[in-house]
Amino acid sequence: MAEAIAGNETPPRLIVTMIWDAAGRNVLGRWKDDWPYLESLIPQGAWYEHATVGTSPTSTAQTHATIGTGAFPDAHGIVAHRLRIGDELTTPWAKGPAYLVEPTLADLYDRAMGNEPVVGEIGTVSIHLGMLGHGAMWGGGDQDIAVIREKIGADTLGAEGFDWNLTPDLMPYYRFPDYLDEVGGFDRDVRAVDSNDGQIDGRWRTNDIETLLEGFDTPARIPYQTRVMEEMIAREGFGADEVPDLLFVNYKMIDYISHVWTVNSPEMQDAVKGQDAALETFVDFLDATVGEGEWALVLTADHGSIPDPKVSGAFQIAATPIQNGINATFDTDGDQTRVVELIQPTQIFVNEAELRRNGHTLEEVSEWILGLTKADTLQPGVTVPSGEGDDLVFQAAFPSTIMSRLPCLPEARA
């Protein structure tokens, strides 16, 4: 990306790395007429049309860590939304940034500059913080600013609360500006979403706003988060002097909609329009606050969005019948310990000791999985079209025991 900075004799006062979570090419392509402001910026900067970098599985935690470190998950350590550490299954930010084993750009730059730059991130959940880094955990680092809205003790890594916060596991390493919860105007944002169809009825399209985290899980969050971000920039002094500062941002609205309504929904169109409008507002703010030509913005997505299977023709594989089937077939000793600990995209966590006690191997489980059909793995309420019930649903299933023998994985033999 050398051309992005060609001809600039002085560095920008502020570099913003912004993620439109889940707003991959399939989102922009589906709603190609709904981001005119972003499109207007393309001739003014560097635009990469045919560049895709990803991980498997393509989920948020490892992708944000890749953006932050410039390394892939096998090097930076955040390999998925569930990790096996010893005999335990855990989450990537359960111990703060401890499982992020590589430094981020922010870690190294801030320390090299004597912690003089203002460095921070605003997102919604801790798995976004892989962009930012370790804060005070990294040797010589300080407590960088971190702002999320994570629901403490939630069952999923994407669960959000209503207040900006930091979880207890993050507090030793980052600093949270308490004043951000005082930023107002959210009620006005919710009302604007409510009235978008011409009437005030407590609904966003056909959806009850109150049940959507009191409106936060609607496009109302986009202008609200933008104002919170602008307040933080102004009060913390991002871009206020000649020492370049780093700000990382995650907007999660598109991601939420992709999981609940899919990329093809009118709700997604609303979110894309909202993000585009907020981008224009933010650029105007940066010009007025930091100075025109004194800042740089990197905008990307961490992954794409889920299409409606009615549109894509995809068959959605249900995890529950797979888990129940493995346990019924390979775990018959009658104790309370189960062979399957957890099923995640691309991987099944197996209690290998329990599997051995039942006289079976990972290879046997893999062979069993390869025989699963659409009829075996239906989602509740889904009907398989006539003649497709015996269609196999997996092309491959690898036992982890073969990893060290694969020529394509020399690191597995280290």
Image: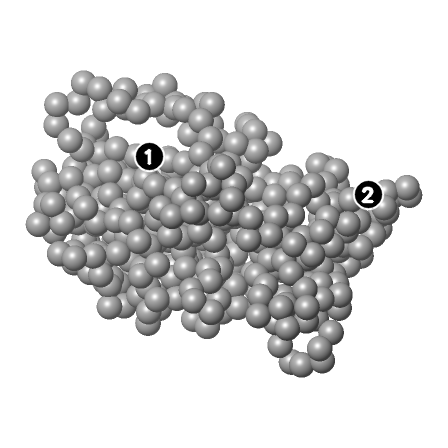
Label 2: few (<14), some or many (≥20) within 10 Å? Answer: some
Q: Residue 296 versus residue 240: which sits nearer the camera?
A: 296
Q: Quadrant of residue 42?
A: top left
Q: Which residue matches tag 2?
A: 391
Residue depicted at x 33% and y 72%: 168
Identify the mark nearer the N-term, 1 or 2: 1
Q: CA–CA distance between discs 1 and 2?
A: 44 Å
Q: Is residue 85 left or right of residue 173?
A: right
Which label number is shown at residue 190? Answer: none
Is residue 320 shown above or below 116? below
Residue 116, position in %: x, y?
A: 10, 49
Residue 72, position in %: x, y?
A: 39, 42
Residue 346, position in %: x, y?
A: 58, 49
Residue kind at label 2, given as amino acid type:
Asp
Residue depicted at x 71% and y 77%: 333
Residue kind at label 1, given as amino acid type:
Val
Is residue 28 shown above or below 362? above
Residue depicted at x 19% and y 46%: 108
Quadrant in which the N terminus is drawn: top left
Q: Secondary structure at mark 1?
A: strand
Q: Which residue matches tag 1?
A: 298
Q: Secondary structure at mark 2?
A: loop
